[in-house]
Image (cartoon, helix red, strand yellow):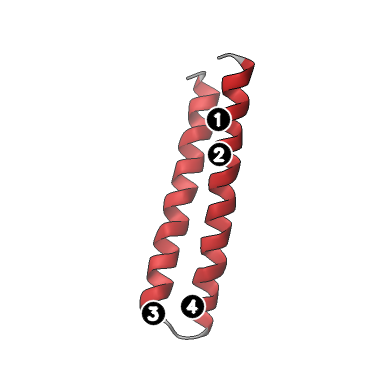
Amino acid sequence: MKPYAHNVLNSLADLQDQEAATWGRRASDAARWGLGDDHAEARRRAQLHRVEALALRAGIDAGA
């Protein structure tokens, strides 16, 4: 993999981690305020962003 592609994928993975953290905070806030539906949606979105970040990093490790 070319260094530029590696940097781009790593930056995208970092952004996905940031999104996961944001949604995680939203899930915590929703749980604190007893908003069950909002809590479930925020947890789902946080998990999706974590999976995206892991997939990007796996692609980097595999040399994709």
**Badge 4, how many Cα within 10 Å: few under 14, some, many 20+?**
some
Label located before the other in sequence (2 or 3): 2
Question: Element at badge 4?
Answer: helix
Residues tagged 2 and 4 counted as in contact (Cβ below 8 A): no
Front residue of 17/54: it is: 17
Q: Residue at x 38, y 70 (%)?
A: 40
Q: Residue at x 39, y 60 (%)?
A: 44
Question: Element at badge 2?
Answer: helix
Residues tagged 2 and 1 counted as in contact (Cβ below 8 A): yes
* Mark identifier at residue 36: 3
* Mark identifier at residue 9: 1
Residues tagged 4 and 3 counted as in contact (Cβ below 8 A): yes
Three-letter amino acid code at the position of disc 1 = Leu
Q: CA distance from mark 1 to mark 3?
A: 34 Å
Q: CA distance from mark 4 to mark 3?
A: 7 Å
Three-letter amino acid code at the position of disc 2 = Ala
Question: Element at badge 1?
Answer: helix
Q: Considering the image in quadrants, where does the N terminus appear?
A: top right
